[in-house]
Image (spheres, rainbow, N blue to C red):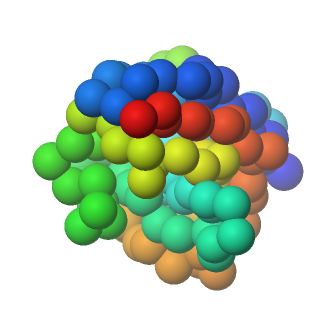
Amino acid sequence: QVQLVESGGGLVQAGGSLRLSCAASGGTFSMYSMGWFRQAPGKEREFVAAISWRGGSTGFADSVKGRFTISRDNAKNTVYLQMYSLKPEDTAVYYCAARPAPGVVSLQSEYDYWGQGTQVTVSS
């Protein structure tokens, strides 16, 4: 059983940056590919970014491509989401998720474990 804990959310002005972290425990982190998802008020949860279990492959939603990066440190059992040029429409609760497989996928149903989420609010 993998436990995931997100941190790093907060309030930031439009154009600013934030880095989210997701710390994993209870499993062999390097055997899991990781994803970030977000859910804005009144909307369904959506894919943001994902990274393969060794970090060699990444994928991004079109809405964040070029503004967000995803990385992982397998020695620290942590995955990061670096967010630049934030927009008010990036406001959401951000969740990390883990799946015991190597590749990059965007489907929520492919992920077995989820964190509790961290709030990101971007003011205009």
Task: Report whether residue 67 is seen.
Answer: yes
The answer to whether residue 106 is left or right of residue 115 is left
In the rendered image, which quarter is residue 63 located in?
bottom left
Closer to the camera in the image, 12 or 119: 12
Q: Residue furthest left?
A: 66
Q: Quadrant of the C terminus?
A: top left
The answer to whether residue 92 is left or right of residue 83 is right
Q: Residue furthest front?
A: 124
From this view, report whether residue 86 is shown above or below residue 115. above
Task: Report whether residue 111 is seen.
Answer: no
Q: Residue at x 67, y 37 (%)?
A: 119
Closer to the camera in the image, 42 or 95: 42
The answer to whether residue 99 is left or right of residue 54 is right
Question: Number of numbered discs present?
Answer: 0
Where does the image place residue 104, in percent across and percent down from the top left? 37, 66
Q: Residue at x 51, y 78 (%)?
A: 107
Closer to the camera in the image, 122 or 65: 122
Where does the image place residue 113, in percent across and percent down from the top left? 74, 58
From this view, report whether residue 65 is shown above or below residue 71. below
Q: Residue at x 84, y 51 (%)?
A: 1
